[in-house]
Structure formats: C-alpha cells, structure tokens
Amino acid sequence: MTTLASRWFSIPLWQRVVAALILGVIAGLVMGPQAESIKWIGDLFIRAIKMLVVPLIFASLVSGVVGIGDLGKLGNVGARAILLFLVTSVMAIMLGILLGILVKPGEGLDMVAPAVFSGAEPMRGAREILLSIVPDNPVRAMVDTDVLPLIFFSLLLGVGILMSGKAGGPLKRVFDSTAVAMQKVTIIVMEFTPFGVFALMAWVAGTYGLAALVPLAKLVAALYVGCLLMILLVYTGLVRFVARIPVRQFYRGIADAQAVSYSTASSNATLPVTLECVQRNLGVSKGVSSFVISLGATINMDGTALYLGLATVFGAQLFGVTLDSSDYLMIVLTSTLGAIGAAGIPGSGLIMMGLVFSSVGVPLETIAFVAGIDRIMDMMRTMTNVTGDCSVAVSVARMTGEIDVKVASAEPVI
Ligand code: ASP
C-alpha cells in the first residue's frame, strides 16, 4: 500500500493529470453515455477548487499588497503592473478577433442551435459591471464569490494595513500566515486533479463521442495559435526588452507553473507554484511577486481575453450576425472586463461569454457549442494567463529594481 502510494506520488502531478486525461477519454468511449455515472467525481473536484477561490484571493491579495512594504512603492508597482495587464489584454483580444476573421472557424459549421441554454450568466451591462466593483457589503461579495468587489476590498484592506504602520502588524501576520496555509490547502486539492480530470474527460467523451470534437477543431486550433503568438511575441518581447533577462532561463524557470496551469486549467490553483517559480527561479522580490502574481492570477487573463474575442466572432459567423467597427470596439471593452471579472478557475472564461455576446447580439447558444470542448481550450488559455502574469512580474520587478538578475540568469532552483 505504502509502496503504491509512494510510487503514485513520485510521478509529477502534471504527468498523472495528462495520463488521467487520456485514460478518461478512453474510458468514456468504452462506457458511452454511462460515463455520466462517474461525473460526480469531477464535480467534486470542481467544488473543491471553487472552495479555494475566496480565501485564496483574499489572503494572497491582502498579503501581497502589504508585502510591498510602503505606499509609494505600492503605487509604483501597482500602476506599472495594471498598465501592462491592460495593454497585453487588449492586444490579446484584438489578436483573437483577427484570428476569428482570418480562420473563420464558425463558417460552414452545420449545427442547430439548442432551443434553450440555461448555463449562461444573466446579462450584465458594462456600466453595471463598473458599478459592481465597489461592494456594498464585502462579506456578501465573499459569500457570493463576487470576485471584482472582493479584489477591490482586499486591495483597500491591504492599503489600510500599510497605513496603520505598527498597529497593522498583527493583522499583516494573520494574512501572511493565512496565505501560506491556503497555498498548502491548494496543494492538497490539486492532488485530487487526476481523479477529477479522469471523470470529467470520461463524461465528455462518453456523452459527445470523439466526432463532436471534430467540427470545432478549427476554433481550438485558432485559440492555440493565438495563445502561442501571445507567448512567443508579446511575453517574450517583455522578458527580452523590458525585464532584460535571458528568455531561455525565463521559460525554464516557469516551466512548472506552465505545466500545472495547463493541466489544472486554473490560474488560482497554480498560484502557489507560480509564486515559487517567480521568486526562487527568477529572483523577483517577495513583495512584488506576491502582489503582481496574486493580482495577475485574478485580473490578468490574456488567454481568456483572446478567447472571448475569438469566440464572439465565431458565434457571429455561426449565426450570421454581422459585426461593424463599433461592435468590435464593444467586444474589446466587454472582453477586457470579462477577462478581469473571470475567476481563475476552470471554465470561468465560458461564463464570461454571456457578457460579451449579449453586448453585440451574438446568440448565447454559442456557449453551448463550445462548452463541450472548453476544457481543451481552457488549458491553453490558462497557461497563457499564467505566462502573462510571470512576464509582467519580471518586467515590473526590473522597472522597480526588485529582481535579482543573477538568480534570473542562472539555472532554475526548483
Ligand atoms: N481557467 C482560466 C484560468 O483559471 C480562466 C478561463 O476560464 O479562461 O485562468
């Protein structure tokens, strides 16, 4: 028993996850619709991930802000990080739209729209979203897992603790230690990933069969190409020209975070690994890395942004909706908000489609088409999200003198 357990744990988590994915598909094809009976294992896993979101964001953001040390530095680091987050997100959305127009994934697809699709979020206008950033009750924001107001409150609380000086000390320690404990809880939940992935893949393959994946291959390919372009051009550019550290070492240093994000499809679940990689392998100071990486895992989602742009064009092609230039502008705006508002958990990008689609009149039924293959795309966009966070972290650290270039240029520690 012990040997079995130690052998199991000696295999890197991501390899167990990839194996689970392949075995899950095979099991699903063998079991057919009966695979539905094991879906609950996947649901259990998703619940466990969702369980982490509020305490993880709350603790890591407050501790990240406080970790910056003083308000002047916070402004310096925060302004630079948010500017880079926004610029890269807008680039990602425009790339997604462009790929949608060029690849035309939604044309010639012969699928009938289901009459009712109940999975979408209720429509929310852009103004309403901006208003909802300020919570009227932070506890309710936590209870409802309302990420934007939660972020807002966490940032303010961090600033408050900084302003309290000595008196804020005990609270700072509480948040620091909660953040560490939450990272450990995340690691426990992550150990459940292979089982969750196996069950979910078996269910997808069993319900839709492999054939269901074929017509959507173009969309998947377009997303993968777009994400790769973001990584190769935009992030590599940031690392090379802004952070000025060796590109090869950067990618070697964050390889673990990339593997974990790709297999878990959750920026939040990857957060502890990303933090470790950026601090230990790339020499970014604790303050800057905790702040930029926690904030980035929550609001900087370029892969998701790209996906929202691409999927909107896809849906428009699918249902013959014509988009004009003001529609494209609207897509950029709502996709930016959608990517900011999406939680770093599997499938949240899909939920945000409701917001973007409804702003330009693309039928929400599109969500039902892509839902079945969302996981494959979710993995890639999450890896892009996390890579983006890391590239912004090293860039901001360089701009504010918070990176140990010697560490960043050396071989990875972990
Ligand atoms: N799963 C993604 C993440 O955690 C969000 C998304 O669904 O696009 O970063």
Image (cartoon, rainbow, N blue to C red):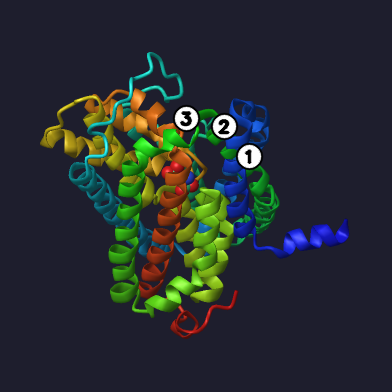
Measured in 3D between alpha carbons, the distance from the residue under mark 1 to the one under mark 2, in whole angstroms, is: 8 Å
Seen from this angle, which residue lies furthest left?
A: 325
Mark closer to the chain start, 1 or 3? 1
* Tag 3–tag 2 contact (CB < 8 Å): no
Specify the amino acid type for callout 1.
Ala
Question: What residue is shown with label 3?
Answer: 136
Q: Where is residue 54 in the image (x, y as percent from the top left)?
A: 58, 41
**Mark 1: secondary structure:** helix
Specify the amino acid type for callout 2.
Gly
Question: What residue is shown with label 1?
Answer: 27
Are there few (<14), some (14-19), or many (20+) residues within 10 Å of tag 1? many
Quadrant where the image shows the C terminus:
bottom right
Q: Where is residue 58 in the image (x, y as percent from the top left)?
A: 56, 47
Classify residue 353 as left or right of residue 169.
left
Residue at 36 percent of width and 42 percent of height:
217
**Residue nearest the viewer, comparing 281 with 168:** 281
Q: Please tell me whether mark 1 or mark 3 is closer to you in this view.
A: 1
* Tag 1–tag 2 contact (CB < 8 Å): yes
Classify residue 345 as left or right of residue 24.
left
